[in-house]
Amino acid sequence: MWNTKKSPAGSDVELRSFVHHDALRPEEYSAHAPDSSVLGSEKRASHSRHPRWKIGIRYCALAAGVVFLFNLIFLLVGENRSGFLPINSNGGKRVVYDGDCDTTKRINIVVHMLINVLSTILLGASNYCMQCMSAPTRAEVDRAHKKSEWVDIGVPSIRNLGKVRKLRAFLWLIMGVSSLPLHLFYNSTVYASVSASVYNVFTVNEAFLDPLATNYTEIGANASKPDSYTNAMLKLYRSDSLERLNTSDCVGAYAQNYQTARRNVLLVVSDSTKGFTSGATLDFETNEYPITDPNDSCPQPFQWICTGILNSDDCLGSSCQSKISGIQSQVAEWKPFGKTIEYCMSEKIDQHCRLQYSVHLVIVVIIIGLLKTVAMLFISFRISDTPMMTIGDAVSSFLIRPDATTKGICLLNKSSLKDFRIPASPAHGTSATGGYSSIGWSAPPQTFDHKKRLHISAASGRRLSLFIITYGILIGVTIFLLIYGVVWFKGDQSEAYGQGLGAIDARSFITWELPQEGTAGLIANVIVANIPQLLLSFLYLNYNGLMTVMSLSREWARYGVRRQGLRVSMTRKGAQRSTYFLQLPYRFGLPIIVITGTLHWLISQSIFLVSVDAYKAGASIGSLITCGYSPPAILATIIVIVVLIVILAVVGFRRLPSSMPVAGSCSIAIAAACHAVPEPFQKSSEAIEENAADAEVQWGVMGSDDKGIGHCGFSMYAVDYPEQGKLYA
């Protein structure tokens, strides 16, 4: 015989600390409770008519539809500006902007921030839908329990896919698989290309610039080709196309990895300089070609500036970069080609840096967006199942109709599930009435332990292992890229951290054997550049899952210390509360989305697509497609990833609010805590607990039998807190 606790409120100190003062006593219940059959039918009808989780699905479909339309409009506007060229014309590349390089860079940063916002929205929406599709219905939970299996409730779950309806599992697969190409390609659909001009370097004397001069002399290597450059440079000078620069500004203007704003330059020496004393004289010194081979171990974009400073066997392009500030600070001693320079005359040109997009990649992204939108709309309007989205949904269901397979194991802890015996029976068989055979979990009465567990204890070993593997791979790849970037930096390693985020520098090109031209080169380099994006997406899903299971465990443990309504995903009734964004509180969910979006952007600046267009005399002479990397951005990415893990550790290693057995997301453990006391309300207990689903409830000791063995569960009545070392069943 069971004895139900009837301790009056305030009868002792311990009870008052855990029981709400408004809790109803059993003898008071009959005066307040409506007919249970009516209430239960009304509740179930309300739930089926207004599943709140579908509102979230519709918001997700709206968000995905907006992203789809944005991408579609972008493509149509871009193609209209290009004259709707054949799809493979120019390798599928289209120009969005052609002009100033600083403007191109700023637009590119803004565009990629927008892309990362849109991709984060799609990732979050897909994750929401995937969690909804993997959430089990009560029938699916019952089926699993009667097969001696359990399902996850309230968290993203892969293990549930084999236990939910095949259509929902298929929709989960669509949402998941469609995200793979999205994160491989979306960040590189739009990319910047830098223009790089071939230019010539000449030394002339001041007499060469005299407008009254009529006789000119070419010396040096091109002396055998009279007037080959003289007329061209004179024409530029006399048309005011050359800008005068002092020597310091001249060094700064031409110490560029890619010359985008200038072309030919005249280094002006005095008429008394050796070799320049016989009237107007021009000496062709060198011509500079853009770096178009990422495998060049010694890129030399402006080696002429350092002639006379470095030894001939130095890697001038790499070493010269470190000398520029020193040259500018002592510019009076600068002697390129062994000559003292008075000033420079520089040819300014229009810049042709471009913001481009790939038609092929944009079409892929549009198709994915359409697929996701259609799938979400299908889920919203065609899926009629009522899944348990939160632990509140599960507790509500189990209070209305207790689970037959989990009686007598009220202290079941998720981590100790394996210790609870499964009785021998015609396993997995069905009865003559068509129902599953009566099998379940059982164990001797368990002793209660007052020790409060850690939040992280709610996560399964599989979930933790998957997170550790994903996190280890991502942090390993990032650290590898940082080490690779510094060790293989084609210059002084100390200069590797001086680059800007996403800066294009010939010294930091990835020298892997990848195609460098055409659509094949674009796709290959895009995949390499975005593999870390894919890893980050996996990390986000696992991180979100861990934070969710810890959040629901905290919510679960709070029922052991205070009375509160159940948090449900359906239409609220009575004291029930609305759910968070599924199970993760906004104070966790929104920062995680923001940090993840920031990480996606940082990774896009850490390893990125590089496109260089080379020009000679204003005409294109070739292009290069490769991947570049930025050590500062990689370092920033590592720091943010470490911050994420620190946040997880801080949350995970905090103690739960109560000593309530940790159920995690395990359906068996949740169901085991939702059984009513058999006596003295055996005939009315089902009705009482059905109405408890709408009331404020608390977990605790509901009664004990003649042997002193107690029973714990959720109740709308006053409950005691379990005693250390006492037996409960």
Image (cartoon, grey):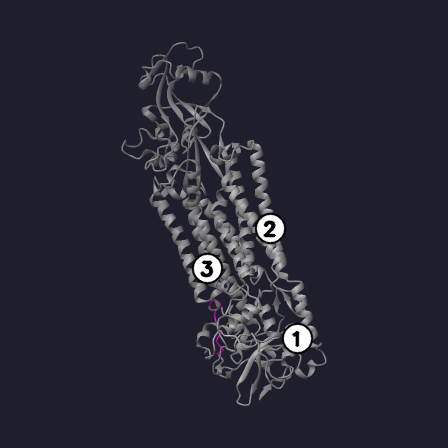
The secondary structure type at the circle numbered 2 is helix
Camera-near label (2 vs 3) is: 2
Dot label at residue 109: none
Residue 435 place in picture, x, y as percent: 55, 74
Dot label at residue 691: 1
Residue 452 counted in the magenta span? yes
Q: Compare residues 133 and 503 and report the one nearer the observer.
A: 133
User: Mark 3 and mark 1: span between their CA atoms?
Assistant: 42 Å
Q: Compare residues 128 and 598 and report the one nearer the observer.
A: 128
- Hey, what amino acid is under mark 1? Asn
The secondary structure type at the circle numbered 1 is helix
- Hey, what amino acid is under mark 2? Ala
Dot label at residue 646: 3
Q: Which residues are magenta?
A: 449-456
In primary-sequence order, the first of circles 3 and 1 is: 3
Check whether the beta carbons of the residues at disc 1 and disc 2 lie within 8 A of each other.
Answer: no
When the figure is inspected, residue 28 is found, relative to residue 249, above or below; the finding is below
Check whether the beta carbons of the residues at disc 3 and disc 1 lie within 8 A of each other.
Answer: no
Camera-near label (3 vs 1) is: 1
Q: Compare residues 383 and 723 and report the one nearer the observer.
A: 383
When the figure is inspected, residue 176 is found, relative to residue 720, above or below; the finding is above
Query: Count of labels shown?
Result: 3
Few, some or many residues within 10 Å of mark 2 (<14, 14–19, 20+): some
Quarter of the image containing the N terminus? bottom right
- Hey, what amino acid is under mark 3? Val
Residue 373 counted in the magenta span? no
Residue 283 place in picture, x, y as percent: 35, 19
Which residue is the site of mark 2?
Answer: 63
Few, some or many residues within 10 Å of mark 1 (<14, 14–19, 20+): many
Asked whether residue 102 appears in the rendered view, the answer is no
In primary-sequence order, the first of circles 2 and 3 is: 2
Residue 623 place in picture, x, y as percent: 42, 32
